[in-house]
Structure formats: C-alpha cells, structure tokens
Image (cartoon, grey):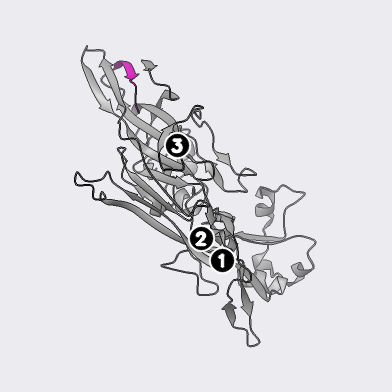
C-alpha cells in the first residue's frame, strides 16, 4: 500500500491489529496553528512533527504528560487537551478564581452560537491546608496567600502519595501491615538503594496533593496537610480523608487507574495464548487521554473555542478552521473512494498561543488498498 501526503502537514500511515485480531490501516495527520491576539487563527510557519512517544513536562513518569503519542489505533472520542496556566482576573493576585474552557459547534446561519459541545470550569486557589484541631477534627482552611497564576497540572489537583523512607524516624510508628513486603521491595521502581519502608499512592493521580492515609498521618505526626489548589466548583473538596477525582484540563496518564482499567487483562493466560497482541477485553477508549469531562464526539472543524482566565488577558476566543481533509483511496479492484478525516485530538496551548489538530482515519486491510492520498486542507 502506498501513501501520499500532498499537504504541508506531517502525516503518517501505519498498519495495526485490534483486540479481535483484525488488521487495519491508520492514517494520522497533525497541524499546528497560531492563535493571534484578535482571535484569528493561521497556519504556523513551523509545523510540529507527529508525536512518536509520550512527552512529559519534566521527569518521565514523575510529572504531568504534555503530549501523548499519535501512534494509536483509534480514539472513540475526541480528546480536548488544554496545557495552560490559570491567571487571576486582571492580573490581580487572588485567593481563588474560576478558569474555564467552552466549545460550541459552528454558528447557525443567523449568527447565533452553535450547539454546546463542552464546558468545564475549574476552581483555582492559593495554597491551602487541612488543619487538625484540638479535638482531632480536621478543618479545611481558607487559602493562606493569594496567587497571580498557577500551572494547571495534576501536581496541584487531588492526589499524591504517602511515603516513609527507611531512615525516617517515623518509620518506627508504621505497623507491619503497612510496610512494603519483600516482594514489593524487590519490584519497587526506585530500585534497591532508594526503596522506602512504606509507600502507597493515589492510583487516580500519584502526582497531586491532599491524598493521605491514617497510617502515614500518624507515623509523620501531621497536624497540617496540603489541600489541592485545583478543584471542581460543582464537587469541591470538603471532606477530610475522602478521595476525589483529580481535576484539570490536561492528559490523564496511561498508568493511572481510570485509564488502566480499560487496558484489559494481562495475566498468565494472556502470556500463553495472546502475547504480544492486545487482550480480548481491551477497550479502545484506553487511547483517549483527555480528562473524562473533556472527551467529546469527533470534531469536524469550525467549532468556536472560548477560554476564560487561561491567558493574562482573561478571555481568548477563536474558531477552528472549517475545512475537512479528505483522503482519496484506490482499491486493488480499481474502485476509488473519498474518505473524510475526523479530528480526534484538539490540543490548545494558550501559553504559546498554539493549537494542534490531529486527524485520523482507520481503513480495513480487506479489500486490499493500493493507494491512500491526502489532499490540501485549511
């Protein structure tokens, strides 16, 4: 099968197999756009390449994911990802404010806004803490200081880890049932020289703050515990010790529980009968990495985007290009077909004033395809 890309945008064709053993062709194309102060959008002079491996903001597996690989089979929904910094309104430091993203479909002929596709808001606060009272009751205090801005990464959302080092004096207070077993110590990712005495993590977000277990709190003799600075205005953190879903506009890492549950079963039976293929219970939704609230039906183009308090100016609105790329397909039989590509990843980076669009199309390998060719778009 030959693949021809007649556009200026990076594109790639590859073949893959799903969890049912069915082979198919995948074509993915990425476009990078500039957002101008007046809301106009234009094609960037320098186009970002196809993302081949996951990229992190800092250390791999120990920081939030900036971009995920484009080399996935299929995304049942469109990922909307906003790598942004929240800015207090007017640039005036604030104890708390709301940041949001809103997407409407293309406007109606009469000029009215199109149908609402997505709207999500985050409550962003200054540093705040749970404090233990004289009678042992924990109270969430107001933010201790105002902030002018905050990176919207899961490091500041609910989550985190409880970790006691081998040489920590508090280790004597950790009961045997909470200590790592010899097997866990052997398998610990930190290696034999750095493995802790006891270690548990919030499986929905190991990077965050606010997650704490009783054994850890007692061992460390804590009277104050940091609380998340990124919260859900509709379901805010109010109960001490309760686990809350992490809030943000960024990518949920593949290894976190909410995505890992979709990856299927990798057991001895899989090793014996299917390895290295996907398990039969693999769910293609695993490839969707956006926050669950930011997964929407595939976009067509022409959608209107509105960002609130995600830029120093406070409000940024722009419209996605409305042209849909089409791929011409020529089969071995001589028949031809025109197949539209759908947007399955919309990544917005207000800090850089950039937008990335990723289109994808999946074609079966039967009947056999001789040529797939993408024409000009945008």
Query: Label 2: few (<14), some or many (≥20) within 10 Å?
Result: many
* Disc ID at residue 356: 3
Badge 3: residue crowd in 10 Å (few <14, some 14–19, many ≥20): some
* Mark 3–mark 2 CB contact (< 8 Å): no
Element type at mark 2: helix
Rendered residue at 59%/79% (across/down)? 138
Q: Quadrant of the C terminus?
A: top left
Question: Magenta part of the protein: which range?
Answer: 368-378
Q: Residue 11's quadrant in the figure?
A: top left
Of labels 2 and 1, earlier in sequence is 2
Q: Number of marks in the image?
A: 3
Marks 1 and 3, the one that precedes in the sequence = 1
At which x and y percent is residue 321? 34, 35
The CA distance from mark 3 to mark 2 is 26 Å
Residue at 33 percent of width and 30 percent of height? 361
Q: Nearer the viewer, mark 3 or mark 2?
A: 2
Which picture quadrant has residue 76? Answer: top left
Residue annotated with mark 1: 94
Q: Is residue 305 left or right of residue 353?
A: left
Q: Are marks 1 and 3 in contact (CB under 8 Å)?
A: no
Tell whether position 372 is magenta.
Answer: yes
Question: For the residue labelled by badge 1, is the local secondary structure a helix, a strand or a loop?
Answer: loop
Label 2 with label 1: CB-CB less than 8 Å: yes
Q: Can residue 281 be spotted in the picture?
A: no
Mark 2 = which residue? 89
């Amino acid at each position: 099968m030959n693949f021809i890309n007649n556009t200026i945008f990076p594109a790639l064709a590859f073949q893959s197999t799903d969890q049912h053993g069915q082979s198919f062709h995948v074509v993915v194309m990425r476009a990078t756009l500039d957002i101008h102060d007046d809301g106009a959008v234009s094609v960037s002079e320098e186009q970002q390449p196809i993302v081949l491996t996951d990229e992190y903001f800092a250390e791999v597996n120990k920081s939030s994911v900036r971009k995920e690989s484009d080399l996935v089979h299929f995304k049942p929904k469109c990922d909307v990802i906003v790598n942004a910094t929240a800015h207090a309104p007017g640039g005036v430091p604030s104890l708390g404010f709301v940041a949001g993203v809103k997407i409407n479909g293309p406007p109606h002929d009469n000029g009215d806004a199109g149908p609402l596709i997505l709207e999500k808001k985050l409550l962003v606060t200054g540093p705040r803490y749970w404090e233990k009272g004289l009678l042992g009751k924990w109270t969430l205090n107001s933010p201790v200081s105002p902030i002018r801005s905050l990176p919207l990464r899961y490091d500041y959302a609910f989550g985190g880890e409880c970790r006691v080092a081998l040489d920590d004096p508090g280790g004597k207070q950790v009961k045997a049932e909470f200590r790592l077993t010899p097997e866990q110590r052997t398998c610990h990712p930190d290696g034999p020289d750095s493995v802790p005495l006891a270690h548990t993590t919030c499986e929905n977000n190991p990077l965050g703050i606010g997650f704490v277990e009783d054994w850890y709190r007692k061992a460390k003799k804590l009277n104050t515990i940091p609380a998340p600075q990124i919260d859900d205005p509709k379901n805010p953190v109010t109960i001490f010790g309760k686990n809350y879903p992490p809030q943000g506009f960024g990518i949920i890492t593949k290894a976190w529980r909410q995505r890992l549950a979709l990856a299927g079963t990798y057991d001895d039976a899989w090793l014996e009968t299917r390895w290295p293929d996907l398990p039969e219970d693999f769910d293609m939704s695993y490839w969707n990495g956006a926050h669950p609230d930011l997964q929407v039906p595939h976009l067509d183009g022409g959608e209107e985007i509105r960002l609130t308090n995600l830029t120093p100016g406070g409000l940024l609105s722009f419209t996605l290009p409305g042209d849909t790329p089409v791929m011409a397909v020529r089969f071995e039989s001589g028949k031809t077909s025109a197949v539209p590509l759908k947007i399955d990843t919309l990544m917005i980076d207000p800090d850089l004033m950039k937008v990335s669009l990723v289109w994808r199309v999946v074609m079966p390998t039967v009947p056999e395809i001789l040529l797939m060719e993408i024409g000009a778009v945008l």
